[in-house]
Amino acid sequence: MSRRLVATLVALLVVSAACGGTSGSPSASNAPYRVVATTSLFADLARLALGDAVQIDAIVPAGIDVHTFEPAPSDVSKIAGADLVLMNGLGLDEWVVSLVDAAKQSNANVLRLGEDLDSYGFQYLFDSEGLPDPHVWLDPSAAELFLQKIASRVVEDRPTLTSEIRAALDEGRASLQAQGQAARIAFSAIPESRRKIVTFHDAFGYFARTYDITIVGVAIASPGQDPSAREIAALIDAIRAAGVTTVFSEVQFPSKVLNSIAAETGATVLADLYSDALGAAPGDTYIGAMRANATVIVASMQR
Ligand SMILES: [Zn+2]
């Protein structure tokens, strides 16, 4: 985010604090605990961890790309007064740090869900530059770690909510495990030679590792860039060589690139996988979105 935008955000916050009285101060212990997540997907994981014990909001609207998101000045007011800000980290949603600063919030209120998972035994995937792939939540075991981290943090901050949160967490983890297990069973019934996918952006590495799927290729290396002619040609070759008949678009990336790749290879474009963003029901929850992903991918492999 530009320095000028940050300055605007700070100025707006000063005005809103002056008009709004106590709106910028942290909530008292009898006020509802407020969680603000960068994306709708992390907000829903917070719901699975915390149930109805707290108030939860998201900054990036459903269906919008988180990688290239530029916060609006009005987003500062969403952060102001939050007890906890949830972000993924790993380079996905760093823009929220500027909002936290503009809202004069402490960075101690920020929980980086996707970071330090190796201390729980999770193994990161790395890109060619040695940077960890941020899309860890597409592995259900990492999503479960998100739930644990969120629940522990809120219980620490607000011990009076302990029993309520413990009950929500047990239920949330059971739902995640059931969904992951159902997907594992469905994918394991597909012959290995057919467990191959092509997606729009490079988000499905952990998903592919979890369900033993080969990623044949992706249309764009990183969001915000268009693929070069050479990259498109390489992907077309890879699709032909692998015999892939379906390519998947993603809900937050309307793109014509996949259509032309599909036309060239005779593959079908299937809309829309959920990677970084939730969408309309049944993809409006993490579990609904993951179930929809598994269903549509398994069906494409059976064709
Ligand atoms: Zn992504």
Image (spheres, rainbow, N blue to C red):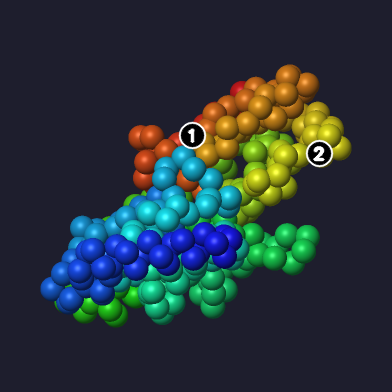
| Label 1 crowd bin: few (<14), some (14–19), many (20+), radius 10 Å | some
Residue 233 appears anywhere in the view: yes
**Nearer the observer, 245 or 13:** 13
In the rendered view, does 231 fall on the left or right side of 205? right
**Nearer the observer, 20 or 108:** 20
Q: Which residue is labeled 2 in the image?
A: 228
Amino acid residing under circle 2: Ser
Quadrant of image for the C terminus: top right
**Which residue in the rendered view is the most extreme toward the left?**
30
Can you tell which of label 1 and label 2 is closer to the viewer?
Answer: 2
Q: Is residue 43 above or below residue 145?
A: above
| Label 2 crowd bin: few (<14), some (14–19), many (20+), radius 10 Å | few
Amino acid residing under circle 1: Thr
Name the residue located 18 percent from the left edge and 76 percent from the top edge.
Answer: 28
Residue 169 appears anywhere in the view: no
Cβ–Cβ under 8 Å for marks 1 and 2: no
Whole-percent x and y of residue 298? 55, 34
In the rendered view, does 190 fall on the left or right side of 183? right
Whole-percent x and y of residue 228? 81, 39
Name the residue located 53 percent from the left edge and 50 percent from the top edge.
Answer: 69
Name the residue located 32 percent from the left edge and 55 percent from the top edge.
Answer: 57
Quadrant of image for the N terminus: bottom right
- Between disc 1 and disc 2, whose residue precedes? 2
Q: Which residue is labeled 1 in the image?
A: 295
SS of the residue under disc 2: loop
> Ligand 1 near label 2 (Cβ, under 8 Å)?
no
